[in-house]
Image (cartoon, rainbow, N blue to C red):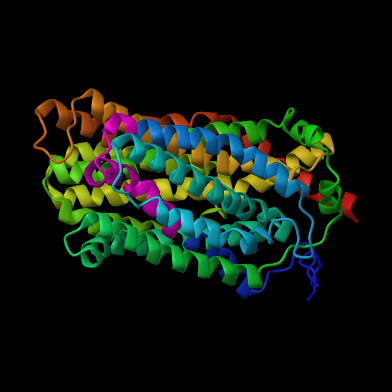
Amino acid sequence: MRSATENHGHDDTDTLPMIQRISYGSLDVAGNLLYCFGSTYILYFYTDVAGISLAIAGTILLLARIVDGIDAPVWGIIIDKTHSRYGKCRPWFLWLPLPFAIFGALSFWSPDISMTGKAIYAALSYMLASILFTGLNTPLSAILPLMTLSPKERLVLNSYRMTGGQIGVLLMNATALPLVAFLGQGDDKRGFILTATVFAIISCGLTLFAFKNIRERQSHAISQEEKLPVRKSFSAMKGNWPWLLMVMANLIFWIALQQRATTIVYYLTYNLDRKDLVPLINSLATIQIFFIIAIPFFSRYLSKTGIWIGGLVVASLGGVLLWLAGDNIPLLIAAWVIGNIGSGIACSMPFAMLGFAVDYGAWKTGIKATGILIAFGSTFCIKMGSGIGTAFAAWVMNSFGYLPNQTQSAESLNGIAWAFIWLPALLFALAALPLLFFRKYEAMEVQIQKSLQTSHR
């Protein structure tokens, strides 16, 4: 077997084979299918199925994300230190999918033990699943700049990734609650664990398929990273303003996105008494996939920064439209789709642009620390933002008097509306502010790429 770090005949401007593009996209199908099932339904599972109080459930999820946020840079350092016959990032797609599948499924098991025992089990199982997901998600982002130096090909690969992610989300949204009902036959505890098991098996298989097909290009920078001391890898952050701006924007974005995703089931169940619409409305959000696919086309006319800001503005606007829709279901669906088109575009851009932040750090400091920079810029933001967003949602609803499986008071319904509509809309808008300062750095991208390609020859 040839090493993954072999060049495979590609120069910096080559188009990668279609099988690599598809395989790269399938990694996000795998990750989103299981991870988004957890991020979307785990709070509801804890409160309305397992019987854990909302305040405790929110705290569990926040603690899990804090631990996970800490382990993100650790995974980045591990990846920077990894050198095997498969490469730096690729071997993790062989080693981790089965453990992640096991603990991802076990997160939706509610053992018949004391409430304290349930809370401890929920915290431990979800933490382990989250840590393992970080171990898969970090190399998924970090491998992009290692597959090609071409900014154009990186953008194309990222579109395949985001398309794959949307396919995973669509499959989950369309089938999750129907599978819970079908497999559980009236027993939601049984339905959730069996549904999680189905998703886990598919996720594991797709990740192994991707491992078989993707490759890392050989470069001088990779050999340097293998020898990079841990302390020195942090120096790549020094003065790396493009990276810092992206981290700020991406972290705020994920707080908003997770809060919106977590609370829609509560809003439809209690505010509108239409829980039956959850699979349909969540599935319709996947219309955003067409706009994500079109990002390389948009980039002909707009800067990547402009596309990112535009996505955040549309996502925020979608929240305002949700409020205006009230209980008008067709208008609510239209507003939800518009908001998700914006957030889908905004979600995809950091993955395409973080490779530039890595290159900027290498150009400015002479240190290329791919793993740790992308771990902070991508995985840390996703996991920490998701934890804060879920905890905020739980605490806001709890402060307004939410009680699971009961008719809610007017104040409680108002709290759900705040958690679902207004706070995410405000945060999406806030996430755009750091990006107003990013444009001048993006204008340097071609110059930096030429400089790095010259130094690597």
Camera-side residue: 47 or 337?
47
Q: Quadrant of residue 23?
A: bottom right
In what quadrant of the picture does the C terminus appear? Answer: bottom right
Q: Quadrant of residue 60?
A: top left
Residue 440 in view in this figure: no
Q: Residue 453, percent across and down? A: 83, 53
Q: Residue at x 65, y 35 (%)?
A: 242
In what quadrant of the picture does the N terminus appear? Answer: bottom right
For this view, does 325 lie left or right of residue 68? left
Q: Residue 202, percent across and down? A: 45, 68
Give the residues drawn in magenta, as a range.
31-56
For this view, does 308 lie left or right of residue 442? left
The answer to whether 384 is drawn above or below residue 225 in the figure is above
Q: Residue at x 62, y 46 (%)?
A: 353
The furthest residue to the front: 113
The answer to whether 227 is drawn above or below residue 14 in the figure is above
Query: Is residue 53 rendered magenta in the image?
Result: yes
